[in-house]
Amino acid sequence: MTRHSAVVRSILGLSLLLGLALLPAALHAQAAQPPAKAGGQLVPIPIQLPKPMFEGTPQNLSVPNLQKPLGRPRDPFLAPAGVTNVAKGKKIASSDMEPVIGDLEQVTDADKKGADGSFVELGPGVQHVTVDLGAPQEVYAILLWHFHKTPRVYFDVVVQLADDADFKKNVRTIFNNDHDNTAGLGKGAEMNYVETAEGKLVDAKGAVARYVRLYSRGNNANELNHYVEVEVFGRPTK
Ligand SMILES: [Ca+2]
Ligand SMILES: [Ca+2]
């Protein structure tokens, strides 16, 4: 070995060691960052819940992979101050543009009551609704109610964000409980859950998107798909 290559080797060895030593610090620094680009104080998002139609959450539903009820109200969900429901009154597209009952506008009309007349009913099989937020938004949480008149479990619930209405550009799946890929959107690791007046909250982590799409494939009571309301808590991108 020449003197030169020995020097090169020791330099290489030293930089490798330095790199390894710095790696945990770098990872730690990344983990310590606040969520998204918050850059300010986090406050609870302004959720307004509808009146419950039944007490508690029944545990006798024969649905596999079912999430155990929390047994208390959900913890407040924190996001930057100024985050509101940017889906309110926004335009809805759907795989079923002629609902069996009701109108697509009911998905974002701010009526979250569980009674008849307050939900839209879509046909059987895999169906989706797509909310057009009108412009790109920083999305922190999606809150959705399929139905809460009686306790039900909706199957193959998948929530996606995208930059375009056709869901071809920058598609991100932020919730998926289709464990066996029945809906064809890929397998999901999330659990089935019972619908209640609290709705289902999906953490969107400040992702930027203009379109939000929600899939389902019927429920444990019938093959149809329903929506009482979909709320998207976000704020315009700067
Ligand atoms: Ca509604
Ligand atoms: Ca499935």
Image (cartoon, rainbow, N blue to C red):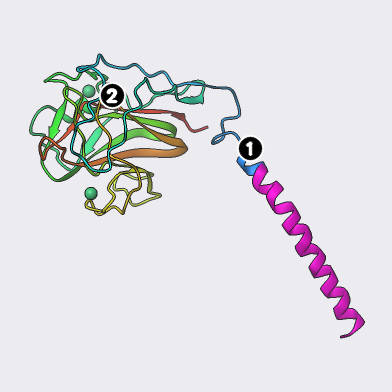
Q: Nearer the viewer, residue 145 or 105?
A: 145
Residue at 72%, 58% (x, y): give it: 20
Residue at 58%, 22% (x, y): give it: 41
Determine which residue is flagged by label 2.
89
In the rendered image, which quarter is residue 57 located in? top left
Determine which residue is flagged by label 1.
32
Q: Is residue 168 left or right of residue 156?
A: right
Q: Amino acid at mark 2?
A: Gly
Q: How many marks?
A: 2
* Residue 234 drawn in magenta: no
Q: Amino acid at mark 1?
A: Ala
Residue 91, position in %: x, y?
A: 26, 31
Verify CB contact (< 8 Å) between mark 2 and mark 1.
no
From the image, give the main secondary structure of the stretch colored magenta: helix
- Distance between the alpha carbons at the discs numbered 2 and 1: 37 Å
In this rendering, is residue 174 above or below 2? above
- Which residue ends up furthest to the bottom in the rendered image? 1
Q: Earlier in the sequence, mark 2 or mark 1?
A: 1
Residue at 24%, 44% (x, y): give it: 156
Q: Is residue 118 left or right of residue 20?
A: left
In which quadrant will I find the N terminus?
bottom right
Residue 230, position in %: x, y?
A: 29, 29
